[in-house]
Amino acid sequence: MNYEAFYRQSVDDPDTFWSREAQRIDWHRAFDTVCDHARPPFARWFVGGETNLCHNAVDRWAQRQGDTPALIAITTETPDGTPAEKTWTFAELQRETERTAAIMRSLGVGRGDRVLIYMPMIAEAVFAMLACARIGAIHSVVFGGFAANSLATRIEDAQPALIMSADAGSRGGKAIPYKPLLDEAIGLSAHKPGHVLLVNRHLAEMNLVAGRDVDYATLREQHLDAQVPVTWLRSDETSYILYTSGTTGKPKGVQRDVGGYAVALASSMEHIFCGRPGDTYFSTSDIGWVVGHSYIVYGPLIAGMATILYEGTPLRPDASIWWQIVEKHKVARMFSAPTAVRVLKKQPPELMKRHDLSSLKALYLAGEPLDENTSAWVADALGVPIIDNYWQTETGWPILSVARGIDDKPTRLGSPGVPMPGYRVKILGEATGTVCGANEKGVVVIEGPLPPGCLQTVWGNDERFVSAYWSNFSTEQVYSTFDWGIRDDDGYYFILGRTDDVINVAGHRLGTREIEESISSHDNVSEVAVVGVEDKIKGQVAVAFVIPRHADRVATPEAKQQLEKEIFAVVDRQLGAVARPSRVHCVNLLPKTRSGKLLRRSIQALCEGRDPGDLTTIEDPASLVQIREALQS
Ligand code: ATP
Ligand code: MG
């Protein structure tokens, strides 16, 4: 089958298509209905079926290939950055998951209860997620490193019976205490958890609150022999809640099901990620993000692969650490983000060449636009296909990519690809709500029902689900991605930025992303952010902040001016003078969310002399100081 036939069947005959895909997982009870879409925009997948994510990720492989590696936890958060690692086979992972499940049960956690997981990238975090899935508790993983305020709002929204955490995380070899933040967050929240289960890594002091806090290691000893059979769940029961990364405002609690998600992951592991049982998979994301849920924990394990859980930065002990891991563990498929690749691009290229990367078949990148420059650089450096894929926390798996498990349909530079199975993607005119022609820019939308694996609703707020996502056009009820895009003559899609990142310069509507793409083609630009800033005459003007690749070449004010001039010329040539930014500022940090996405709204606010807004999700507040300083100079 080729891609076209494969995709066509998924949208023309979804019952046949998804019935077949559903056979990739084990069902305790067969489903009666493939998709119930009687109450749009809500969709229920595999109705009547019963299954379990943990069974499909762990137990069934423990039965078939119990001695093969399942989880490889590697940390470079050691005193000198020397990697330390530990491996669990599928059989061992099952035992450990049962122990954690037994601990949770002993603390009163039952089916449907929420468990908030606020953990560093350590194996116990994976045991915790899988244990929840095993007993039908709903996990809500919150990125470890969010400060007390962000954590408090999530505690209040999810109302967990149990919070699982640790004494500390670690970054660049420095302990980051979690417990004081957690105590503060619980203090701020109106909801109080029954218990707090703490893994003590002995990185930081920890005061246990009597009657509430319990020690993981102590309880584990008591449950060493625990056997906790999986709880069979209805396909449409809730497996987890995950908050979006908050690039554009208050995070939404994305709620996911059990059966649809399991099938979507099994299907995507086969068709997009070409996952083979026994192969090793390495995603550099964090379990606090959707990529971590789908493609560190559940996806690879459901496919019977060994998955690498990496705690550490890409630069410590040196910038070759990822490639060292690829070589040592013969990683077949790797998943990362453009932002991480841009960091590596600034490092000496020899570091990559030092390792035997012949096991690697492809690198998948997602999370933000992959500029052509970065894509070409990493393709050349690694010598493997670079597979861009576009999706959202809401969808749980790629909307756009290429299906390498199906055929060799070529990728196109700058495009994440074509629709993945079940996604009826369209481009609608923002004002008209009618379908755009080829190469005509509009909003990327998806016709309902969304395929399996996508969000069921917004946690505790069906009304917000409908009003936020499905009510943006008067012409028809479609799911809005809030991203701009175009489809070219051959059906490839291009993502042109977020709908709230559009600026209006003297009546011309410009996507900041297009200007960024153009600027990043300049040799000495490593990263760039463009924002629209209020202007008395033109309405708005574009202002650019660039991180130079070679900071030494722009050390003087004259050199900075020269760079600005060259960038103007690049933009003039590629997009026309209307898109030319009014200023180009050099910085060496840009404000980003914890997941590596540019916080354009905060930059824009600073440029306009306003408060930068909600900064609870910001990675490095020093970046704002840099923006301020650049503006003053
Ligand atoms: P919030 O919705 O709370 O503002 P967020 O949109 O940043 O946060 P995510 O779900 O993590 O939260 O990010 C999804 C968004 O990331 C997409 O809507 C898109 O804007 C961007 N994105 C993801 N992958 C790609 C890609 N391959 N190319 C271009 N953009 C991408
Ligand atoms: Mg979003």
Image: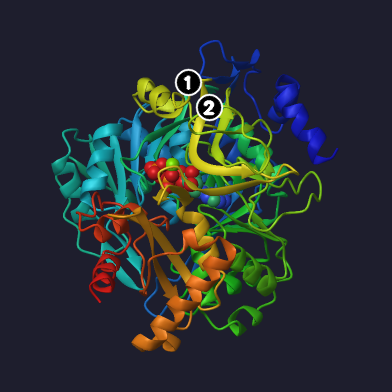
Disc 2 and disc 1 in contact, CB within 8 angstroms: yes
The residue lying at 21 percent from left, 50 percent from top is: 148
Give the quarter of the figure containing the C terminus: bottom left
Q: Which amino acid does label 2 sit on?
A: Gly
Distance from Cα at disc 2 to Cα at disc 1: 7 Å
The residue lying at 14 percent from left, 42 percent from top is: 188
The answer to whether residue 160 shows anywhere in this view is no
> What label does residue 433 carry, if any?
2
> What label does residue 405 carry, if any?
none
Q: Position of residue 137 (x, y in %)?
A: 40, 31
Asked if residue 41 lies left or right of residue 125, the reply is: right
Q: Is mark 1 on a helix, strand or loop?
A: loop
The numbered mark, 2 or 1, whose residue comes first in the sequence reads 2
The image quarter containing residue 7 is top right
Q: Where is residue 496 in the image (x, y as percent from the top left)?
A: 54, 49
Label 1 Cα crowd, 10 Å radius (few <14 / some 14-19 / many 20+): few
The residue lying at 27 percent from left, 60 percent from top is: 607
The residue lying at 57 percent from left, 15 percent from top is: 37
Label 1 sits on residue: 474
The image quarter containing residue 280 is bottom right
Query: Eyeballing the image, is 132 above or below 200?
Result: above
The image quarter containing residue 570 is bottom right
Asked if residue 435 lies left or right of residue 293, the reply is: right
Q: How many labels does the image show?
A: 2
Q: Nearer the viewer, residue 47 or 13?
A: 13
Q: Which of 303 and 468 is in front in this view?
A: 468
Label 2 Cα crowd, 10 Å radius (few <14 / some 14-19 / many 20+): some
Q: Position of residue 186 (x, y in %)?
A: 18, 42
Q: What residue type is labelled 1?
A: Ser
Query: Eyeballing the image, is 121 above or below 303?
Result: below
Q: Position of residue 512 (x, y in %)?
A: 45, 55
Quadrant for ligand 2?
Answer: top left
